[in-house]
Image (cartoon, coloured by chain):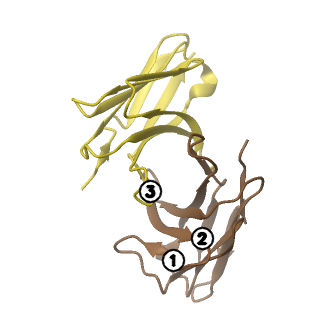
Amino acid sequence: GAVVSQHPSWVICKSGTSVKIECRSLDFQATTMFWYRQFPKQSLMLMATSNEGSKATYEQGVEKDKFLINHASLTLSTLTVTSAHPEDSSFYICSARATENYGYTFGSGTRLTVV
Amino acid sequence: DQQVKQNSPSLSVQEGRISILNCDYTNSMFDYFLWYKKYPAEGPTFLISISSIKDKNEDGRFTVFLNKSAKHLSLHIVPSQPGDSAVYFCAASLLGAGDKIIFGKGTRLHILP
């Protein structure tokens, strides 16, 4: 079945630094990938839609200059959290859709802790 | 404005019995609905989906029912097993509208021995 690999699974960084999270579709091509954020005991909140070869579409309230998304190929999308602050600490998850009837496949998530 | 609502944050069910997780939505334009299961510190796992042209979809122990007039769907798990203990997210999508899916807040299911 469709597999989405997300890396790293966890990362700790200092305030002010930037962190890059990768999302790869391993056995299918994904023209569109999605980035979500989950706070403890909260729902998965869509942050942005990543489109291969074009600019990402950000949801209302998400700072595009802070959360940089690059979708340079049909199998890779990256999310870079720039100038990270403690409030950016969260669980970030990517997803992609393999085929119309398959449903969305999610990566295993990245736990970001900013200290 | 929560377009997908899961009003029960948690549910406890005896092993072997039926688990029923409920979900309501407000946007009548949604045309595709999905259920996901999630363990802590892991990404969600797709369980089952249903198109708005159907009212029932069954896959093994999992059945999803859709009542469009009531804007309500439910996930039935029978019989419930210990490994079913997890958080279940209901999600809705508007096919063709960027493929975005909107999640509910989730229901934590506890299967009791």
* Image mark 1: chain: A
Residue matched to label 3: B100
Q: Residues within 10 Å of mark 1 (few under 14, many from 20)?
A: some
Which shade is chain B? yellow
In the picture as drawn, the residue positioned furthest to the right comes out as A27
Q: Secondary structure beneath disc 1?
A: helix
What's under tag 2, amino acid-wise? Thr
User: Residue at position x 52%, y 80% from top?
Assistant: A55
User: Residue at position x 56%, y 43% from top?
Assistant: A103
Residue matched to label 2: A113
Relative placement, left or right, of B12 versus B72 is: right
Q: Is residue A13 visible?
A: no
Residue matched to label 1: A86
Query: Mark 3 vs mark 1: same chain?
Result: no
What's under tag 3, amino acid-wise? Lys
Per the model, the C-alpha gap separating discs 3 and 2 is: 27 Å
Q: Residues within 10 Å of mark 2 (few under 14, many from 20)?
A: some
Per the model, the C-alpha gap separating discs 1 and 2 is: 7 Å
Which shade is chain A? brown
